[in-house]
Amino acid sequence: NGETAFPCRLTGEVVAEGILLQQAEEQNHDSVVYAAHLIKLPLCIIFHEWELAEELLAQCVDAWVRPHVSQLYLSFMKAFVHIIRFHETLKFRYKRTMKKFIADFRNLVEDKGVDKLCEPFFALLLAEEAASTAPANVVMDAFNCAVRYFSKNNSHASLLYQAIANERCGRNLLAYHQDKKATAHS
């Protein structure tokens, strides 16, 4: 039925995480390990496996010199995970790191000249950031903006992040006791 005790483990016909990582480590293919970690990060967000997300992010940072696209993606994920962690824990260290990671992502985007490409990701970061201080209608509008940005592109990644934006909107609306509106987003 698709249920598992470890929803963030890559298993199946296409990828068997244990075998893949063992072979990659035996053959010193750090890039495969790094790619597997990047693939798992959205699963960590969907299934609220925050400690695993932080562990994967730390391993990715130390893994190897990253190419242009994965460097942007890793930078976004660090900011996104830390924003959510701050909202859920209210620990000051996440507030400090989320602001740093958002600034790092913005600087990297500007340096690479990929502002248009990263608009949906900025919209999602801004929506998540608004969720800590703004009223429910502003939060919903911010997440809807992110969903619209992602829906402009019909790629699998855009569909995934459109779903994540909807789910995060629903979760935040539940925190505001907006159950009916939250149901439309979850």
Image: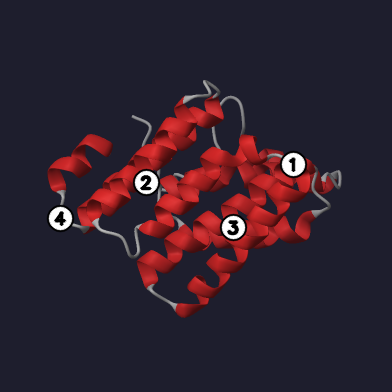
User: What is the secondary structure assignment of the residue under circle 1?
Assistant: loop
**Residue 52 in the image: above or below residue 5:** below
**Residue 20 in the image: above or below residue 64:** above
Whether residues under marks 1 and 2 lie with C-beta atoms below 8 angstroms apart, the answer is no
Residue denoted by label 2: 142
- Mark in front: 1 vs 3: 1
Residue denoted by label 1: 113
Residue denoted by label 3: 78
C-alpha span from label 1 to label 2: 24 Å
**Among the two numbered marks 4 and 3 on one chain, the one whose residue lies closer to the N terminus:** 3
Whether residues under marks 3 and 2 lie with C-beta atoms below 8 angstroms apart, the answer is no
User: What is the secondary structure assignment of the residue under circle 3?
Assistant: helix
C-alpha span from label 4 to label 2: 18 Å
Q: Position of residue 18 (x, y in %)?
A: 64, 43
- Depth check: give the residue in front, 157 or 104: 104
- Depth check: give the residue in front, 155 or 121: 121
C-alpha span from label 1 to label 4: 40 Å
Q: Position of residue 122 (x, y in %)?
A: 53, 47
- In the rendered structure, which amino acid carries the disc numbered 1? Gly
User: How is the protein colored in the picture?
Assistant: secondary structure
Judge from the rendering whether residue 141 lies leftward or rightward of residue 112; answer left or right: left
Q: Position of residue 153 (x, y in %)?
A: 53, 24
**Residue 157 in the image: above or below residue 47:** above
Judge from the rendering whether residue 94 lies leftward or rightward of residue 176; answer left or right: right
Write the residue at 16% across / 50% down: 178
Residue 141, by quadrant, is top left
- Mark in front: 1 vs 4: 1
